[in-house]
Image: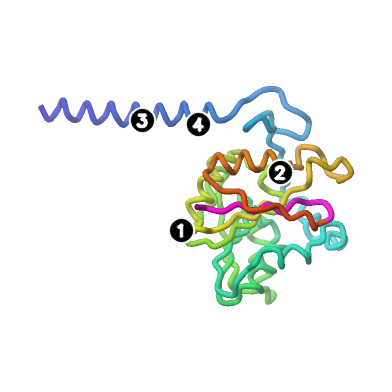
Amino acid sequence: MLAIICLFLLFGVTFAAQVCATQAADIYETRRGSFDGIGKFYMGREIAHVMGHQAADWLERPERKAEEGTEKLLPLLGIKPTDVLADIGAGTGYFSFRMATAAPQGKVYAVDIQQEMLDMIAARQRQGAPANVVPVLGTESDPKLPAGEVDLILLVDAYHEFSFPREMGEGMVRGLKSGGRIALVEYRAEDQAVPIKTLHKLSVKQAKAEMAALGLQFVKSDESLPWQHVMFFAKP
């Protein structure tokens, strides 16, 4: 009898794993892609190539402030001094350290999948940058955030490069507190005048669909930045 039960349990676990694998495979479509994409499509959108750490200087370029209105973004986020924050695709920490200054009694998880980027963040901290930034080495499918701890997640021009957007999205939702928010900053796909490659842009319509698939509720889109949407979504 025990052997039968064990076989049943083993079969059940194996079947469940097969179902999960099938469902994951059904989320994405692979076909011939464009020059700037990886040939993998999610909800009709081709995923863009990741910007490597070799291009880190572009994140810190002097003209970024004027081009993107970066100083306008932080006030839009509504950060409280004690907030626990996350910067996904943190890169050099351009926004991580600004967020840390706005939340001096809180902390910022600076998440990136490239150790080289996190090394740059650590080097800046050794030179006096805010210590309440916590570098986190994520993976392509998991941001490695602590469950239910984060008040606000910021993603600046990063989400469109996620190789596994559904899994990353689920990881972000797990990390959010109830009522926590995601601020998705992306170049406006609706505006041909924005001088950015097509796959590195995202429309509000597409963002709403992808965030809704995660169970997130659309709050608003702010259009006050020169090139980017600032789209807010909340965890119920």
Q: Residue at x 16, y 25 (%)?
A: 4
Label 3 CA crowd tier, 10 Å (few <14, some 14–19, many 20+)? few
C-alpha span from label 2 to label 3: 35 Å
Q: Are marks 2 and 3 in contact (CB under 8 Å)?
A: no
Residue mark closest to the camera, 2 vs 4: 2
Which picture quadrant has residue 110? bottom right
Q: Nearer the viewer, mark 2 or mark 3?
A: 2
Residue extent of the magenta highlight:
226-236
Give the image location of residue 101, x and y in percent: 66, 74
Residue 191 appears in which quarter of the rendering?
Answer: top right
Residue 24, numbered label: 4
Position of 222 with respect to 219 (left or right) is right
Residue corresponding to mark 1: 148
Badge 2 amino acid: Val
Number of residues whose C-alpha sits closer than 10 Å to that of mark 2, classed few (under 14), some (14–19) or many (20 or more) = some
For discs 2 and 1, the disc positioned in front in the rendered view:
2
Q: Is residue 230 magenta?
A: yes
Give the residue type that dot 1 points to. Answer: Gly
Q: What is the secondary structure assignment of the residue under circle 4?
A: helix
